[in-house]
Amino acid sequence: MSEEKAFRSGFVALIGRPNVGKSTLMNRMIGQKIAITSEKPQTTRGRIQTVYTDDDAQIIFLDTPGIMKAKNRLDTYMVGVAEKTLTEVDAILWLVEPSTYIGAGEQRVIELLGRVKTPVLLVINKVDMLEKRERVLPVIEAFRGQREFAEILPVSALTGDGVDEVIACLKKCLPEGPQYYDEDTVTDQPMRQIAAELVREKALRLLREEIPHGIAVTVERMEEKDNGLVAVEATIVCEKESHKGIIIGKGGAMLKKIGTQARRELEEMMETRVDLRLWVKVRKEWRDQENFLREYGYTDKN
């Protein structure tokens, strides 16, 4: 009689410099978009938890902000979230780009990883950008000399190439354990927070380079009506009056564009009609103001 396979479960942190594809990889692994993505760095600001479940394992992923040099209190909070997460997980996915250059950002991550005994899997992301697959070999050798890794895995979060192998290797690193969440759970993020992040994502993708880092989004109201329609009222917070004008756009065109794109994605996610209404508010230098950081959810508690 064959022995029943042990169920494994645990928590896995995704870390790395800004814009290496952590959120894209996490979304790909759970098969659903939860974390917002954009080409701009510092898109992820807090710790986002998602859940992958199959017949023999449950993996709880913790997507973290990119590790960088802090320039304000918001940056300090973000880096603190990433660093603290490393001490609370069963395995770590360190994402890097396919380059042999190991700069200050990677050196900072190496320093942090030296403080933990948790198994680390090095994920070389964006291999779809390489002209030939064998060009990843020098990258592997460059990083292999930096520390010991449980595995080194070339992947493309964009195309899905190599992602199944990441999950298989993670299962080997996780201890035997219970199923923490039911099989239908993909995130513990409240819908209000997901809605706020979707609005911020559309703003990140549509606005000029100098504006996105200075915005936050809060959802003041989310209510389901008797007819099934969900009413959402949200505010985009920026730091300058000039930025407010750009976010609104001529005749409200930019704000409408942000709202339309966010509404469509919310309707698809919630499988119902959504009435999304947006406002814009100026809060000067909010990223360095403790009271505003707390108000917008950037606190140790969250």
Image: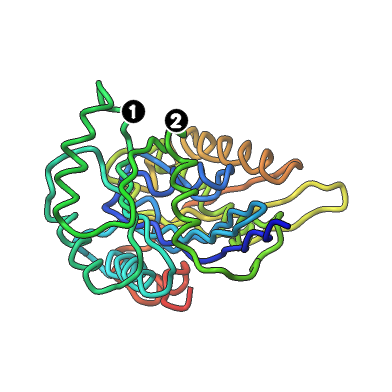
Q: Residue at x 37, y 63 (%)?
A: 283
Q: Residue furthest top?
A: 131
| Relative horizontal placement of residue 25, taking residue 112 as reference (left or right) | right
128 is higher (above) or lower (below) than 170:
above
| Res. 220 visible in picture | no
What distance separates the C-alpha of mark 1 from that of mark 2? 8 Å
| Relative horizontal placement of residue 226, taking residue 114 as reference (left or right) | right
Say which amino acid is labelled 2.
Thr
| Res. 284 visible in picture | yes
Helix, strand or loop at mark 1:
helix
33 is higher (above) or lower (below) than 182:
above
Q: Residue at x 78, y 55 (%)?
A: 224
Q: Which residue is mark 1?
A: 128
Q: Quadrant of residue 70?
A: bottom left
Q: Which residue is mark 2?
A: 159
Label at residue 167: none
Say which amino acid is labelled 1.
Asp
